[in-house]
């Protein structure tokens, strides 16, 4: 039986621009479970990335509630820095690796910020990167010396550094060729099905629906279910 880990209820987000208010998300509600891949598909500008950023506490909504592992992240008493560090791992479309750090150092960084001992950081980062197929000389490579696929695998390893319950992936195949993108989706799917992570992806690529356990369509800020969860 699946275990609900993420609950989003009636979330709305509006941006103020010169031309007037723009509603990016309007009354969005959904749940996502451990051990499942949940996908939100929609075109650019539909609000799906904004919704992901709200769940990751990188944006704050005007209305609604979001609970992760039973804790309301919009509660004024919630330590958002700790929440981002311990409960969610973010995989960005453009990788967002620190260019002056090596692959190994990029993965060690979240653990360093969490106060993990350096020897443990090094051992876990090496192990995570090996699982992603990044080892040998690549451990000391900087992002500009790696391919897009290698950068994305490093980004996934970094997202897993502090063993979060939820992995948030923004257009994880958006900057990759077809074969590399397929490999990245296989990695993310395995994290859900084999390791029990709650993987939430937002994408314009509807082929990813083939591996999704639960799926939604985003259009003009409105979210609608297109495949029910278990």
Image (cartoon, rainbow, N blue to C red):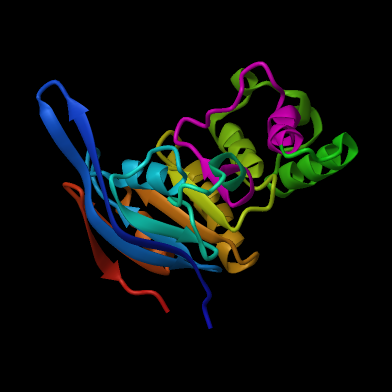
Q: Residue furthest right?
A: 119
Q: Residue furthest left?
A: 19
User: Which percent across, then down, holds residue 130?
Assistant: 76, 45
Q: Residue furthest top?
A: 100
Quarter of the picture containing the C terminus is bottom left
Q: Residue at x 45, y 55 (%)?
A: 200
Is 53 placed left or right of 9 in the picture? Answer: right
Which image quadrant for residue 196?
Answer: bottom right
Which of 89/7 is in front?
Answer: 7
User: Which percent across, then down, holds residue 174?
Assistant: 40, 38
Q: Residue at x 67, y 21 (%)?
A: 142
Q: Is residue 171 above or below residue 229?
A: above
Which of 137/199 is in front?
Answer: 199
Q: Is residue 146 above or below residue 33?
A: above
Q: Tell whether position 145 is magenta.
A: no
Q: Is residue 225 above or below residue 162?
A: below
Labels in figure, total: 0
Q: Magenta part of the protein: which range? A: 84-113
User: Which percent across, then down, holds residue 41?
Assistant: 30, 53
The answer to whether residue 50 is visible is yes
């Amino acid at each position: 039986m699946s275990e609900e880990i993420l609950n989003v209820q009636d979330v709305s987000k509006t941006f103020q621009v010169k031309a007037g208010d723009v509603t990016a998300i309007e009354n969005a509600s959904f749940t996502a479970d451990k051990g499942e891949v949940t996908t939100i598909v929609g075109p650019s500008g539909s609000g799906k990335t904004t919704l992901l950023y709200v769940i990751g506490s990188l944006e704050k909504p005007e209305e609604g509630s979001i609970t992760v592992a039973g804790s309301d992240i919009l509660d004024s008493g919630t330590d958002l820095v700790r929440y981002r560090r311990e409960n969610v791992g973010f995989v960005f479309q453009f990788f967002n690796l620190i260019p002056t750090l090596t692959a190994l150092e990029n993965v060690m960084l979240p653990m360093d910020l969490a106060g993990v001992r350096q020897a443990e950081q090094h051992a876990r980062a090496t192990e995570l990167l090996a699982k992603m197929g990044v080892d040998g000389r690549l451990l000391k490579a900087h992002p500009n010396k790696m391919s897009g696929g290698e950068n994305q695998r490093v980004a996934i390893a970094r997202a897993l550094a502090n063993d979060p319950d939820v992995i948030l992936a923004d257009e994880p195949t958006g900057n990759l060729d077809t074969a590399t993108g397929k490999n990245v989706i296989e990695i993310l799917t395995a994290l859900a099905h084999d390791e029990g992570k709650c993987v939430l992806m937002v994408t314009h690529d509807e082929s990813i629906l083939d591996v999704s356990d639960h799926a939604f369509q985003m259009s003009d800020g409105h979210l609608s279910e297109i495949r029910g969860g278990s």
